[in-house]
Amino acid sequence: MAASSVEREILIEASPEVVWGVITEPKQIGCWFSDDAELEARAGADGTLTWRPGGRGGDKEFDAIVPIRVVEAEPFRRFTFRWNHPQGAEPNASNSALVEFSLVEEAGGTRLRVLESGIDAVTHDEQSSSRYLEEHERGWGKHLGELLDYLASNPGGAAR
Amino acid sequence: MTITAVAEDDALWVAVADPTRRRVLDALLERGEATTTTLAQSLPVTRQAVAKHLVVLDRVGLVAGRRRGREVRYTVRPERLDDAAEAMARVAAQWDRRLARIKRLAESLQAAAETDL
C-alpha cells in the first residue's frame, strides 16, 4: 500500500546524545509531544501517549490515549515507532502510521529528520474504509506529499 | 486526536490531490472565471478531461459553475480551497511545532550540560 507521508527536518545545536534523550525519554516526550508518555526506547516495546483536556492537544473533554509501538531504537541514530493503531491491536501498515526519526551529527549540532508515513491508514474509520480503498486506488495517498510541497510553495494558501 | 482531524473531509482531499485538478484550479485562479473550453486551451488535456475534473471540483464545492447562455462559467470558491489547504498543511505544521519544541529542549539541555563542565 502506497503511503501518504510528511517529511520535516531541523538543525539542532546539541549533540545527538542530547537530542536522542529528548525524543526517547518519557519525561522529555511529555515536553514536546503528548502531555504524558509511557514508553521504553526498545524495539518491540508497547507504550502510550496521553493528551489531557486543556493540554497540548487542545480542548478535549477526555483524555486521549494513543498506543505506540517502538519499531527500531538505535541509540543516537534512529528511532522509529508506529502509533494510532486501535488499542490492543497489532500495529501494521494498514492500521497505524509510522514515524521515523533519524539523527545525523553535523558541525554545530544534530540534523533531526522526521518522516511520518501511512497517515492515510489512520485517517479513516471502519465505515469509510471501503470508500477509502476506492479513493486510494485513484492515488490520493501517493500525491499527498506532493500536495504538501505544492502548498508549502504557496505561502498563505493558493487562494490568496 | 491530531492526525484523525486531517480526514475531516476526505472528498476534499481526493479532489485536490490530483495533479491535473490542481492545474485546473491554478488556471481558474489565474483567470478568475473561465469556461471548460478556455481552460482546455491552456492545459495539456482534452476538453472532456477538463469537464470531468470540474465536475469533481464542483461536487466538493471548490468551484462553482454559472450558466450564461450556452456556456457554463466556472469560478474558484476560495473559502473551500482554504479549507483544503489548511487540512493539508496541518500534519506538516504539527511536526514543525514538535521539532521546534525538541530543538528548544535539546539546546537548553546542551547549554546546561556545558555550564556544568
Image (spheres, grey):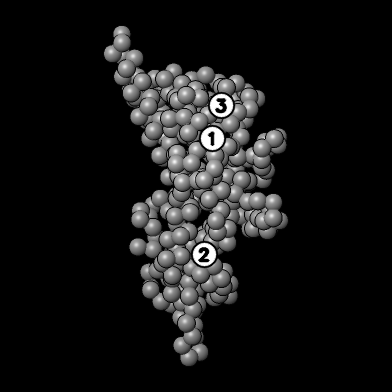
In percent of the image, x 31 and y 10: which residue is there? B116
Label 1: state its secondary structure.
strand
In percent of the image, x 45 and y 50: which residue is there? B89
Is the C-beta separation of discs 2 and 1 under 8 Å?
no
- The reply to whether label 2 and label 1 mark residues of one chain is no
Q: Is residue B25 left or right of residue A127?
A: left
Q: Give the foreground label among 2 and 1.
A: 1
Disc 1: which residue? A50
Look at label 2 and name its amino acid. Answer: Arg
User: Dot 1, crowdedness within 10 Å: few (<14), some or many (≥20)?
Assistant: many
Disc 3: which residue? A38
Examine the rendering and report whether any part of residue B83 can be seen. yes
Residue B58: mark = none
Residue B21: mark = 2
In percent of the image, x 65 and y 51: which residue is there? A125
Q: Is residue B30 left or right of residue A95?
A: left
Where is the C terminus of chain A found, in terms of image quarters?
bottom left
Q: Nearer the viewer, residue A70 or A35?
A: A35
Residue at the extreme left: B115
In percent of the image, x 56 and y 22: which residue is there? A41
Inter-mark Cα distance, 2 to 1: 39 Å
Is the C-beta separation of discs 1 and 3 under 8 Å?
yes
Label 2: state its secondary structure.
helix
